[in-house]
Image: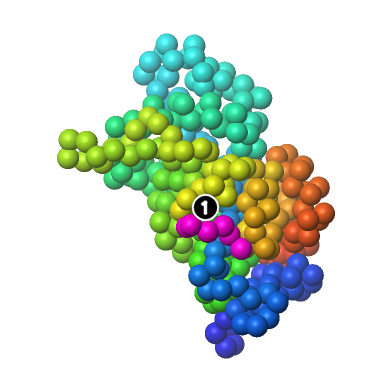
Amino acid sequence: MPSGVEILPSWQDGPTRSAIVEFVEQSSVEGSGGFVPVAERVAAFDNDGTLWVEQPMPPQAPFLLQKLVAQVEADRGLAEVEPYRSIVTQDPEFLAGLARQDPEAVTLFLTGVGRAWEGVAPEAYDAEVRAFVAAYRDARFGKRCTELVYQPMLELFDLLRSHDWRIFVCSGGGRDFMRVIAENTWGILQENVIGSAPEWTYRDGRLVRENVMRGELALGPGKPSHLFARTGRLPRFAAGNGDVDIEMLEVADFGLVIVHDDPEREHAYTAGADQILEVGPQRGWTMASIANDWKSVFIQGATP
């Protein structure tokens, strides 16, 4: 970090902050036991619940749900088939599966998502995302999803960049949705966003979306697979908060787990994270408690 700039100012002094700082600083000290060659300094972060709020549902979910509901309104016959039936009846098991990013629920959901934007050009899709982000407000905090970004994690980005780490977001969420907001929200280049995505094809003089997924979901084992396909490397630093992030942390030298245990300032829950909360300490991963390790939660001015 530049001289005079405070390191991780929103993090409480303690073992969690110290472990992060020590690893990152040692990574750039040639000859130290923790040295990581510059070319291998790849840091990967989950998005929902790691970089911004994911409760009661990841912000991208209502964007997709409202699109599928509009499809049913235009074609009532869709209400008799999945995933539309579960959406219009608000099936609690299905919606809970989406909230915890259960691969089976997400895969079923994406069959409708693929159809919804089939044949749409990038600029049209991006415009829909921007309109949604501008209008959407979180039910509890009354803020845009881009305001419910975790300030401590942005500070971690700054620390990593100051030591020549390249930062990637690797999420089971839609890659193209995240790319629209990545640069202004996280300061991450669009090409460094990895996620579940459709195929694109150039047809009749323009690029359009296909109703076909590009590879496997970026969940669980799909995360290291997507990261390697994109970078040719596996991450040396990885951060996540859910069971679907375990494999990504397994391949890294340093694993950081965000623990949601602050009902006053954010949320307290373990759904979708039971395994990672159990195995994290066993594997020596650094467990970051929102309640105990963060002085503040959201970006400046977002919430009280």
Above or below — where is 267 with respect to 115?
below
Mark 1 surroundings: few (<14), some (14-19) or many (≥20) residues within 10 A? many
Res. 117 image quadrant? top left
The three-letter amino acid code for the residue at tag 1 is: Leu
Q: Can residue 73 be seen? A: yes
Above or below — where is 98 with respect to 257?
above
Residue 216 vs residue 50, the one in the foreground: 216
Residue at image location 29% in from the left, 32% down from the top:
119
Is 141 placed left or right of 292 in the picture? left
Residue 36 in percent (x, y) is at: 60, 72
Residue at image location 78% in from the left, 56% down from the top:
283
Residue 192 vs residue 4, the one in the foreground: 192
Residue at image location 57% in from the left, 50% down from the top:
224
Is 27 placed left or right of 107 in the picture? right
Q: Quadrant of the C terminus?
A: bottom right
At mark 1, the secondary structure is helix
Q: Is residue 118 magenta?
A: no
Residue 59 in percent (x, y) is at: 53, 43
Q: Can residue 60 be seen? A: no
Residue 58 in percent (x, y) is at: 57, 42
Residue marked by disc 1: 227
Furthest-bottom residue in this view: 3
Above or below — where is 121 with respect to 75?
below
Residue at image location 53% in from the left, 26% down from the top:
108
Residue 110 vs residue 212, the one in the foreground: 212
Q: Quadrant of the N terminus?
A: bottom right
Secondary structure mostly taken by the magenta-highlighted segment of the chain: loop
Furthest-left residue in this view: 205
Colouring used for the render = rainbow
Q: Which residues are magenta?
A: 231-236
Q: How many marks?
A: 1
